[in-house]
Amino acid sequence: MNRGGPLNDILRETRIDKRTGVDWKNFCREVVVFSSFQTHLQIGSPGKIVEIDEYKIGRRKFHRGHAVEGQWVFGGVERETNKCFIVPVEDRSKQTLLPLIKKYIRPGSVIISDFWKSYDTLDEEGYTHYKVNHSEHFVDPETGHHTNTIEGLWRHLKVSLSAYNRRKIFFNGYIQTFIFLRWCNANQKNPFEEFLRFAGQLYDPTNTKVEQQRQEFQMHLMEPSIVLEVSASEDSSEDEDAPPKKEGAFNKN
């Protein structure tokens, strides 16, 4: 019996070989990543509340213990509208997170976060900043401040992740697919039609800025995964849609 999974379903329905199927899946992922940058808008505005947080998508060894592999992500949600951004990051340092806050959140916004030290200077950066001490409570009993909206976003992201092989090289594609579908839903757009529109933009031969855009979006980081997946043998358990050998888990350290 053939091993199950989304890729195998596609192969059975279309009767194409595995290498072609993997190649097309990676192409679709590239288009979705491109779309996330094309639709990027800042969130927040003077007086508007934006909740921010970092989270780690990881896996546990032998279903137990601390996370040994994973991907940190940083995100923000505008509470009144649910507009959001999610960005993969290599670490949670101030040097990494502060430029992203300035890029994605408009000055004058009211930012609510936990007590992570990287946020300590937000009051000096043109934002109104409130903190919630999660070691004591999730809703501040005096001010009512909380980060429940961004915590809910992480739960939705977790559910959206593929149940198959959550290797780090695929996390950005999974995250951007989640953002793309969320953007389509919020703007009442047809996901298939929007996918075709963005694919046309990305591979428009008259667009002389495509290569510059690809570098700006760091899409070249995805190319190794395309090479690895296309060259994988049919019996390999390391292909994108193989069931994971270790259980995926979300962990916040």
Image: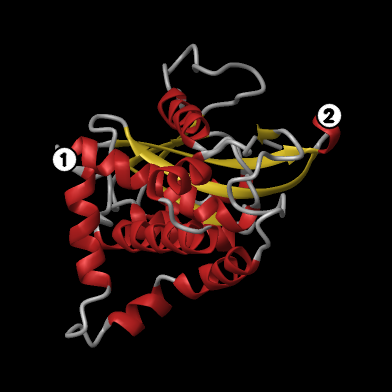
Image position of 47 (left or right of 7): left
Q: Quick one: label 2, few (<14), some, or many (20+) residues within 10 Å?
A: few
Which badge, 1 or 2, comes first in the chain's sequence? 2
x and y, in percent, of residue 89 in the image:
56, 57
The location of residue 26, given as percent across then percent down, is: 46, 61
The dot on residue 64 is 2
Residue that badge 1 annotates: 187
Residue 100 image point, x, y percent: 44, 58
The residue under the point 72% across, 33% down is 247
In front of the other: 18 or 35: 18
Q: Residue 169: horizontal and vertical position, in percent?
A: 60, 58
The amino acid at mark 1 is Asn
Does residue 46 appear in the picture of this structure?
no
Name the residue rendered at 54%, 68% in the picture: 226
**SS of the residue under disc 1:** loop
With respect to residue 27, does 105 lie above or below?
A: above
Q: Nearer the viewer, residue 118 or 5?
A: 5
Spatial separation of the CA atoms under disc 1 and disc 2 = 41 Å
Question: Up-down: is 89 above or below 243?
Answer: below
For this view, does 198 lie left or right of residue 68? left
SS category of the residue bearing label 2? loop
Instruction: Tell me the quadrant of the picture where the N terminus can be found.
Output: top right
Q: Residue furthest top?
A: 141
Name the image quarter holding residue 210: bottom left
